[in-house]
Image (cartoon, grey):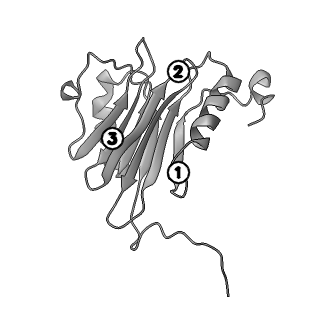
Amino acid sequence: MNNDKQVCLCKNSIDLNIGFLNINHIFNKFVYIHTFIEFYKLSIFCICETWLDKNIFNSSLDIPQNFKCFRIDRPSNGGGIIIFVHRNYVSEMINCFITSNIELLNITVKYNFCIPIHIITIYRPPNCSIVNFFDELYNFLCNLNYIDYPIILNGDFNINLLDDSSSKFKI
């Protein structure tokens, strides 16, 4: 008899199509976002480098129809993360934070009788310390509640593994 613990994500299989894009300023690119979501039939679309700030309200964004929007804005120029989730999914923001080394947005997504899935989108500013970035990411993941839930980690780590200085760091 096999005593291995198995986790059933869902009673019925579902199509969960997730996309990621570093957009480098979102405002003039909503037509591409809509096209991308429709073409790839995305359920969730995670985007980094939105360049949004607290003075830009969601009502002024061209949010795709039937999608909810979660976002975190950097207080200065650049950065920022936005996640669009189709309204067929129950979703909520769990936490988010910005430091000089990392931007992180953590949401959970649930569909029908499925267990929640963590969708964690990360942005690492290009000139910050790789060591500090991974220290902060490690600390976040170690303190993550609901550790039995699946995690989908995505984002722009801004690490060139072909560069000698980056490739010396052990991930």
Pointer 2 residue: 99
Tag 3, which secondary structure?
strand
Q: Earlier in the sequence, mark 3 or mark 2?
A: 3
Residue 165 in picture, x, y percent from top left = 78, 21
Residue at 46% x, 28% y is: 97
Residue 78 in picture, x, y percent from top left = 44, 16
Pointer 1 residue: 151
Q: Classify residue 129 by image quadrant.
A: top right
Is 36 rendered above or below residue 156? below
Choose between 51 and 150: the one closer to the eye: 150
Q: Are marks 1 and 3 in contact (CB under 8 Å)?
A: no
Q: Which amino acid lies under the numbered mark 3 shown in the image of this protein?
A: Phe
Choose between 113 and 42: the one closer to the eye: 113
Choose between 117 and 60: the one closer to the eye: 117
Tag 2, which secondary structure?
loop
Q: CA distance from mark 3 to mark 2?
A: 23 Å
